[in-house]
Amino acid sequence: MDITVVELLKELICFPSLSTKERDMVDWLEKQVVTTGLLEVERHGDNLLFHLGSGSPWLLLNSHSDVVPPSARHVDDPFNPVERNGCIYGRGSTDAKGSVSSMLMALLNLARSGYKPPGRVSLAVTVCEESAGKFNGMAYLRSVIDRPDAALIGEPTLFHPCAAQKGLLILKLETDGESGHAARVNGPNAIYEMAARLEKLKSVSFPDENPFIGKTRITPTIIEGGTVKNAFPDSCSVYVDIRTIPEVSNDVIVERIRNELEISITVYSDRYVSTSTDPGHPIALAAEEITGNPLFGSPTTSDWVFLSDVPTIKIGPGNSEDSHTANESIAIDQLVHAVTGYERIIRRYFELQKS
């Protein structure tokens, strides 16, 4: 695998690896790494693990092989990488094949240099991050591998170290009314009942705050009620998007809203828990020291949710605002810089672990 990180990224972009369709890319990547003889290769389904060293402490790097479907507005063929204005354009260039490429190249460079970590450093390239659900690769790996001592999640952060990310709790609120002809029925209207509850929801807040990601944020996003124009609605439902922080549990949020609104609540999704890493942990110290940038918090979720019990930093080349866009691209100098950055963070993490 005698190619540059730029050439590697271009090869990966050529694979239309939508969620659950990553196998061709994974097969190719596995073969390329095996031929180097530099890393131990382990495969679980279409999830790959590349290892350098053994034992503990164990530092796990992770990024994902899948991409979202292209949009109709792509200027170029989304799966035919184009180099222009110092950037590489193509689906997955930023989210997150740029991270996959730079993380893998960092491990290969360390191996070629003869570096022997006082423990183990590994890269997990996992499937179905974009679609989540039951096929998520990182969730599956946690059921078959040991717990790492620390982790780096490869997502676009402009290679600044992210020490916390908000979780996502989705609730379904429901109110009942009395059905009947709009000209006759005078009973409770489910929509009015919901409107009164939503007015109360405006005032629900939680004082706890995370230093990186702030407070819990509550946002109603979808409302459904009624079936025809001339009948009282006998039910109304609202979906509420709640961006959570580690300091306020999902149970506390649900109970508070249920009690204050006196309303029926169904937990629609609570899989994406909020995460945060102690700024004094070696992985946080290493990332902050090597990048020269302060730790920050992210409102977006990632596979970090499946490593919530592991001290983790989310860091990768690319701008998150370019993710999933028709002009998705990544700056070449940032991609190249990330390779060296990951190498240095890995070395520094093990140094700090020993001290």
Image (tube, helix red, strand yellow):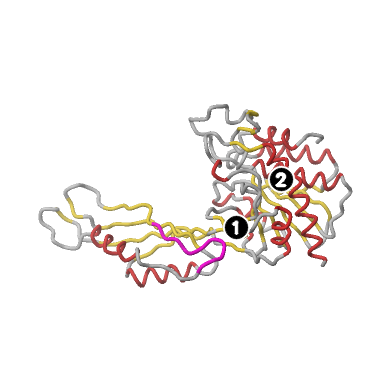
Q: Nearer the viewer, residue 39 or 160?
A: 160
Amino acid marked by disc 1: Phe
Amino acid marked by disc 2: Ala
Q: Quadrant of residue 311?
A: bottom right
Q: Which dot marks residue 338? A: 2
Query: Residue 179, position in %: x, y?
Result: 19, 57
Q: Nearer the viewer, residue 112 or 296?
A: 296
Q: Quadrant of residue 203?
A: bottom left
Q: In the visual, does 163 lie left or right of 1? A: left
Quadrant where the C terminus sits is bottom right
User: Residue visible at 49% across and 70% down?
Assistant: 208
Q: In the visual, does 128 lie left or right of 56? A: left
Query: Residue 347, position in %: x, y?
Result: 80, 55
Closer to the chain start, of discs 1 and 2, is: 1
Question: Pointers 1 and 2 in contact (CB under 8 A)?
Answer: no
Mark 1, other Cα within 10 Å: few <14 / some 14–19 / many ≥20:
some
Reply above or below: 187 against 317. Answer: below
Q: Quadrant of residue 121?
A: bottom right
Q: Which dot marks residue 85? A: none
Q: Nearer the viewer, residue 231 or 110?
A: 110
Q: Is 218 within the magenta?
A: yes
Q: Is 93 within the magenta?
A: no
Mark 2, other Cα within 10 Å: few <14 / some 14–19 / many ≥20:
many
Q: Which residue is mark 1?
A: 296
Mark 1 to mark 2 CA distance (whole Å): 18 Å
User: Residue visible at 42% across and 71% down?
Assistant: 255
User: Residue visible at 62% across and 60% down?
Assistant: 163
User: Residue visible at 80% across and 60% down?
Assistant: 350
